[in-house]
Amino acid sequence: ENLTALIQAIPKAELHLHIEGTFEPELIFALAERNNIPLKYAGVEALRKAYEFKNLQEFLDIYYQGADVLLHEQDFYDLTMAYLNRCRQENIVHTELFFDPQTHTHRGVALKTVVSGIQKALDDAREQWGITSFLIPNFLRHLSEEDAISTFKECLPFRDYFAGFGLDSSELGHPPTKFERVFRMVREEGFRVVVHAGEEGPAQNIWDSLNLLHAERIDHGVRSIDDPELLKELAKRQTPLTVCPLSNLKLKVVDDLKDHPLKKLLNAGIMATVNSDDPAYFGGYLNQNFRETAEALKLSKEEILKLAKNSFKASFLSEHEKERWI
Ligand code: ADE
Ligand code: ZN
């Protein structure tokens, strides 16, 4: 109970959060009704029951379906505002949100609709509650690099809204080497680079994300635990890993939270952070990720404070802005 109060009370940043992954079944049904879109589930309970995943792909299939009911700017606003309310409740004072442009543009929803809706909510949360934020579009790695390149070009008119670009979706069969050219373009335009790697895929994907894509942060990165040389390199460079314990449990990256490598990563001197990934699907927002992980791994108060501190150090806030929280 002591740690629960501590976790709630400390200011935190969240660095690995897909806004489409915060879409709660209640809101999915409400927006489906508002937009006259039929759903293949009988109701909220039936949908929630479908959230049993054997692996990443089973999750992605259902997560892309959920996103199908998002059509209008107001839908993206409502989705984002629901998450920001959560941030306020959980004392998340800074958040760096991912969204998947291709999930929406490929259904005929204009990028401007998506970005405006999300951005208005971020502006309102900043004004009302002082929550700061960055928005980071992610390319879907199961699609071609050509598609990522045309998506990147579509994003350029909105460039002031974006801090960087990322890479997500199915890791197996779609290694970082497939996206070297688009991330060179991303860097040449002055954006930050983050990459999902070493979630289901091997440690080599983390090496390639660092050396070929020049990733500044690795999303997940837990498979680094298999490669002592890589652990040394990550510790030396202080490359942040945005770790998502409850996601790893739900997607069977680990069989039990007690087997989660987070504590070992910290002990190896790595800049690890805790994040919720897709909390509506994985059964817990940020503080629950902290609580369950702290309990399963017997994290000390010092380790919890360190993880919260790391969330700011690893963020894309300026050094000056970080000082406010560290
Ligand atoms: N998209 C949303 N969540 C993801 C995850 N955990 N891994 C890869 N792609 C994702
Ligand atoms: Zn993710």
Image (cartoon, grey):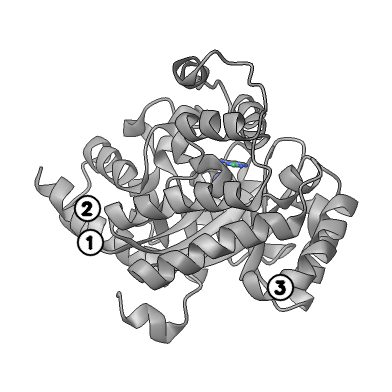
User: Could you say which is closer to the camera, residue 187 or residue 5?
Assistant: 5
| Disc 3 element | helix
Residue 234 appearing in the image: no
| Disc 2 element | helix
Q: Position of residue 61 (x, y in %)?
A: 66, 27
Query: Of all residues shown, which one is farthest toward the right?
Result: 146
Amino acid type shown at disc 3: Arg
Residue at the image point whose x is 64% and y is 53% from the top: 73
* Earlier sequence position, callout 2 versus callout 3: 2
Q: Position of residue 279 (x, y in %)?
A: 44, 39
Q: Which residue is mark 3?
A: 159
Q: Which residue is mark 1?
A: 10
Is there a contact, CB below 8 Å, between mark 2 and mark 1?
A: yes
Separation of disc 3 and disc 1 at Cα? 32 Å
Q: Position of residue 146 (x, y in %)?
A: 90, 53
User: Could you say which is closer to the camera, residue 204 or residue 177?
Assistant: 177
Query: Of discs 2 and 3, which sits in the foreground?
Result: 3
Q: How many marks?
A: 3
Amino acid type shown at disc 2: Ile
Quadrant where the N terminus is found in the figure: top left
Q: Position of residue 257 (x, y in %)?
A: 35, 32
Whether 258 is drawn above or below 210: the answer is above
